[in-house]
Image (spheres, rainbow, N blue to C red):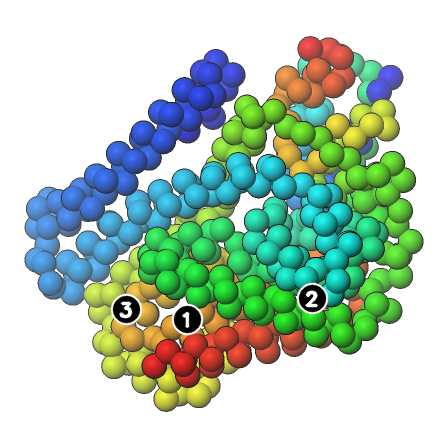
Amino acid sequence: MHVIEVLGPGCAKCQYLERVVREVVDGAGVAAEIRHVTDYGEIVSRGVMATPGLVIDGQVVLAGRLPTREQVAAWLGVA
Amino acid sequence: MTAIATRGAHVPVPLALGLAVGAWLAAWFVNLPAASWVAFEVLGLERGSHLGEAVGFFLYDVPKVLLLLTGIVWLVSFLRSFVSPDRVRRVLAGRGTVPGTAAAAGFGVITPFCSCSAVPLFIGFVEAGVPLGTTFAFLVASPMVNEVALVLLWGLFGPGVALAYMAAGLSVAIVAGLVIGRLGMERHVEDYVWSVRATGGIAEIRPTPDERVREAWRSTVEIVRRVWPFVVVGIGVGALIHGFVPTDLVVSLGGRDNPLAVPALVVLGVPLYSNAAGTIPIVEALLGKGLPLGSALAFMMAITALSVPELVILRRVMKPRLIATFVAVVAGGILAVGYGFNLFLS
């Protein structure tokens, strides 16, 4: 069971990131809880200053960029 | 460049990049002859007529501006991937007031900034101990002296105007930062900002060269997709001005002799937020009709630096007093630039 957090105040890129993550999770049938963190204080305290950010199981894997589907799959260990 | 987007991982990135550069250069050189051919041969318009000049201007400027936009936005997005926000704030946190503020304005030119990231950046800077004035210099310079504006200014007016804009923009950002730093407004930052702590430090993930190329392409597509309608409309209006508006009218309304021209243009610029790409072609046409450079620069700066949506976002971290001070200081700087250039460049 992975805990995936999409960090972003609700901008277009952040929504897109959440969609990509959901697609990968659904496509691979991974057990995961996806949360969207929109609180600015919380985003920065995770160590992300440029949105969108992606945190998987407490580890920041991405900040300020969009990943490819393959990257997301690799981070979730389903590549 | 299209190859990267459509074929994804199948085409090697260096090859796709080479093809894209070739296609870009070919389009660039074919543009002027193609535009005149369409306007004067295919459509049979008369050279020197109002309509002919307007249509020719439009057909030449639309591809030119879109090409410039695509090429330079890509290049800047690529270079940008080498500058992380964390590196910037580490550099800025350890400086004295003046060098730190100047460096912050300089970083503002090259670093990523969408209004989306303004607040996390602000909190991150404060968290790292970057002084408030220095942070503001960054917040002012970042949207105002941005690559889209600079490139269009360079491409449409030449290096002189682009460099004048950059120098003036950096000066406004530095002075605004120094003034706000001097005013000691720390208590007008929302209280929660001071208590945010990045527990695990700020993440730094180094992308691979391929990722840099791809990510740059992706932001280029996103930016160009967002601004191209404004560019086309802007050039359309510019073309009408170019063909039909009499020079005397522009000179009498926007010229040096009308002292209200600069503030009026600044006020007009605020609601045009994010349409810098669409406004520059209009400004180009107006400059050609005798609008003084200072008025034009002030107008451009108001468009890029002062925007209601950005202020609404900044409200999340700043109390109203600080926002009002920010607007007043920046607007003052822009007015000074407008009057200054009009006065000394006559």
Tell me where residue B340 appears, x and y as whole percent: 47, 80
Q: Residue at x 57, y 41 (%)?
A: B80
Q: Is residue B94 left or right of residue B279?
A: right
Q: Quadrant of the C terminus of chain B?
A: bottom left
Classify mark 2: residues with Cα within 10 Å, few (<14), some (14-19) or many (20+).
some
Residue corresponding to mark 3:
B288
Q: Residue at x 26, y 34 (%)?
A: B26
Tell me the CA gap for discs 2 and 1.
Answer: 29 Å
Do pointers 2 and 1 mark residues of a single chain? yes
Q: Amino acid at mark 1?
A: Ala
Vertical comparison of B330 with A40: above or below = below
Q: Quadrant of the N terminus of chain B?
A: top left
Of marks 3 and 1, which one's residue comes earlier in the chain?
Answer: 3
Answer whether residue A78 is visible to the viewer in this image: yes
Of marks 2 and 1, which one's residue comes earlier in the chain?
Answer: 2
Of marks 2 and 3, which one's residue comes earlier in the chain?
Answer: 2
Q: Is residue B78 left or right of residue A23?
A: left
